[in-house]
Amino acid sequence: MPVTTLDPKTALVVIDLQKGIMGATGAPHSTAEVTARSAELATAFRAAGLPVVLVRVSFAPDGADAAPGRTDIPSTRSATPPQGWDEIVDDLAGHPGDILVTKRNWGAFFGTDLDLQLRRRGVTQIVLTGIATSIGVESTARAAYEHGYHVTLATDAMTDRSGDAHTHSVERIFPRLGETGTTADILRKITATVAA
């Protein structure tokens, strides 16, 4: 379904576009495409005076604050991440008005001050981009929906390790959580919101 509207208080929330993740192969979109589209949205949001939230995942050097629990698929996270792996990519970093949120889990709400930061600014809707579609983006979308936000998902500004996982989220999960659209759709709505 196309994006119908953006609330006057909408925030862009960008998930895990950080240096240590950019080397991963993305499907169906490359990480470079996702970064470029997210940066384009961020520029438009900033120009419209709307909040931009940059979410990164990071852990203590010993991993003591990482989510525990047994899983069938072992974590691919190395014991000691390389220096700077959790820094936001240069295309998005360096804007003092942006909000930086550090998460320790898949989703950006649990254990962070994201909800507090949004509510203090009167935000009622979020636009999501980032990596990975079926993990960080989907987990954040689910929590945003549960917190009562209107959720919009920029489906060409996100990617996954698997094209099938991306497609499953976009076609099966996201329509139950919010509205989906392209970067171009959302840019048109930003223009309309600012003009109103």
Image (cartoon, rainbow, N blue to C red):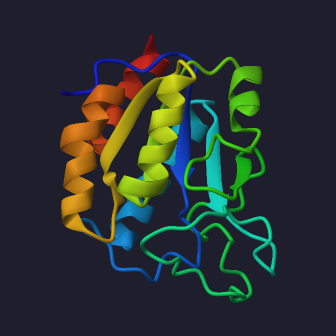
- Does residue 48 appear to the left or right of 59 in the view shown? left
| Residue 143 x/y as whole percent | 53, 34
| Residue 146 x/y as whole percent | 51, 24
Q: Quadrant of the C terminus?
A: top left
Residue appearing at x 68%, y 17% in the figure = 122
Q: Quadrant of the N terminus?
A: top left
Q: Residue furthest top?
A: 196
| Residue 108 x/y as whole percent | 61, 46
- Does residue 191 appear to the left or right of 83 in the view shown? left
Give the camera-side residue of 184 and 115.
115
Residue appearing at x 48%, y 16% in the figure = 7
| Residue 110 x/y as whole percent | 67, 42
Residue 181 in view of the camera? no
Asked which quadrant contains residue 193, the reply is top left
Picture mark count = 0
Give the camera-side residue of 152 and 6.
152
Asked which quadrant contains residue 187, the reply is top left
- Does residue 123 appear to the left or right of 162 in the view shown? right
Q: Is residue 6 above or below residue 26?
A: above
Q: Is residue 84 above or below residue 40?
A: below
Residue appearing at x 66%, y 80% in the figure = 85
Give the camera-side residue of 25 and 76.
76
Q: Is residue 193 above or below residue 99?
A: above
Give the camera-side residue of 138 and 91.
138
Residue 163 in view of the camera? yes
